[in-house]
Image (spheres, rainbow, N blue to C red):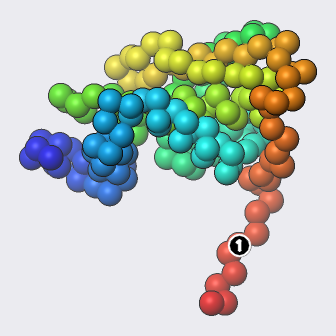
Amino acid sequence: MSQKLYDSLLNSKRGLINGSLRDVILPAILGKETDEMLYWIGKDIARQFPVGSIDDLQLITNQLGFGDLSLQKKSATSQLWKLGGPIVQERINQSGEQTSFGLEMGFLAQEIEFQLMTVAEAEISELKKNCVLIEVKNDPQSNADNERTELVTFLDLHNHQPADDKE
């Protein structure tokens, strides 16, 4: 790790541990396959935190520290999402470092797949200075393909119980 990277992570909104894990340790472990593996890890994270609405998707995305998510455009076969906010802008502008949004793309694709009950895939549409645009394409005809869709119980993000402190 370079001094410049250390300094930027130490002073970042993500913090040293989260920034190191995400942008240093995982790429070191995954190597050339980082983007693809993070995509599938993102899908697995979505399976742990399935949500049933766009509002809940925006909330859980922010709670997971992925950034601020907003729907820009929607059609029957695609959705264009903007992922921004200080964390995303910081990751994009991390000088001299390549950053991957594979985790976010996989997460978003799986969440949309759950909500629409169709096969969905995500890709970066545009990487801007302060945000990333992610296009999620879905196939409305695939909802009959029961092998590719999963039945899930969506989380209730607005009616949660406090953790029990009796340990």
Q: On the rendered structure, is 103 left or right of 61?
A: left
Instruction: Give how far across and how far down residue 167 sits, in percent.
Output: 62, 90
Q: On the rendered structure, is 40 left or right of 75?
A: left
Instruction: Give how far across and how far down residue 97 sits, in percent.
Output: 23, 31
Q: Quadrant of residue 148?
A: top right
What residue occupies the far right of the structure in this picture?
144
Instruction: Give how far across and how far down residue 44 sits, in percent.
Output: 61, 44
Residue that label 1 marks: 162
**Camera-side residue: 64 or 100?**
100
The residue lying at 72 percent from left, 29 percent from top is 112
Instruction: Give how far across and how far down residue 48 sits, in percent.
Output: 67, 51
Is residue 53 something that shows in the picture?
A: yes
What residue occupies the far left of the structure in this picture?
3
Crowd rating for badge 1 (residues with CA inside 10 Å; few <14, some 14–19, many 20+):
few
Q: On the rendered structure, is 107 left or right of 56?
A: left
Q: Secondary structure at mark 1?
A: loop
In this rendering, is residue 145 above or below 45? above
The residue lying at 54 percent from left, 48 percent from top is 64
* Callout 1 amino acid: Pro
**Camera-side residue: 146 or 2?**
146
